[in-house]
């Protein structure tokens, strides 16, 4: 899979991740509601910025970003979050799992971009790797 294809795969999953985070944000319950509700909003706002940055990167390297929900669903590995109440801890466990998968994918994209001498994409993935690692550290600290 070439860098543009991997970026589109990532873009599809980012869009599903955004929806999942927003769904958890709406449906979480529990004693930590206020704190986790706000944190989930921070997460999906960060992902929203990534969506635009990744789509623009695809365009910058002469690709065409996927843009329909149909394409996103067809090209993603993340499972859709259900529109039902979910305890705060369970929502963060689901987010952790999704972030771990996304971290692995951005590492794959970095490797592919390096093979193609696409240093701009490689550098962009460095930022995402650091961001996922930090978020996962925080989530793991919370879940202990």
Image (tube, rainbow, N blue to C red):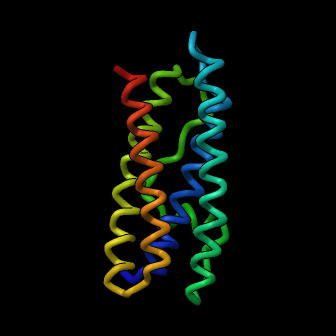
Front residue of 19/31: it is: 31
Q: Image height check: is 19 above or below 42?
A: below
Q: With respect to residue 78, does 35 lie above or below?
A: above
- Residue 60, given in percent of the width and then of the height, sits at 61, 84
Q: Is residue 20 above or below residue 13?
A: above
Q: Position of residue 12 (x, y in %)?
A: 54, 64
Q: Residue at x 49, y 67 (%)?
A: 124
Residue 143 quadrant? top left
Q: Which image quadrant for residue 36?
A: top right
Quadrant location of the N terminus in the rendered image: bottom left
Give the quarter of the image for residue 21.
top right
- From the image, which quarter does the C terminus lie in? top left
- In the displayed structure, does residue 19 sit left or right of residue 110? right
Q: Where is residue 38 shown, x and y percent of the image?
A: 66, 28
Instruction: Compare residues 86 and 25 and report the one nearer the observer.
Output: 25
How many discs appear?
0
Q: Reply above or below: 115 against 133.
A: below
- Tell me the residue at 65%/40% (across/down): 22
Q: What x and y, as percent, mark residue 99? A: 43, 46
Q: What residue lies at 43% left-to-right and 31% top-to-bottom?
A: 139
Farthest-out residue, top: 31
Residue lying farthest to the bottom in this orientation:
62
In this picture, residue 25 sits left or right of residue 133: right
Residue located 55% across and 65% down the image: 11
């Amino acid at each position: 899979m070439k860098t543009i294809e991997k970026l589109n795969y990532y873009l599809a999953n980012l869009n599903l991740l955004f929806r999942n985070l927003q769904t958890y944000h709406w449906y979480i319950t529990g004693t930590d509601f206020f704190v986790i509700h706000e944190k989930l909003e921070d997460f999906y706002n960060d992902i929203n910025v990534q969506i635009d940055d990744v789509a623009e990167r695809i365009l910058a390297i002469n690709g065409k970003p996927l843009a329909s929900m149909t394409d996103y669903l067809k090209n993603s590995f993340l499972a859709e979050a259900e529109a039902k109440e979910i305890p705060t801890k369970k929502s963060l466990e689901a987010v952790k799992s999704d972030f771990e998968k996304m971290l692995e994918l951005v590492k794959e994209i970095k490797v592919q971009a390096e093979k193609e001498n696409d240093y701009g994409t490689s550098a962009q993935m460095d930022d995402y790797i650091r961001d996922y690692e930090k978020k996962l550290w925080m989530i793991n600290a919370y879940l202990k």
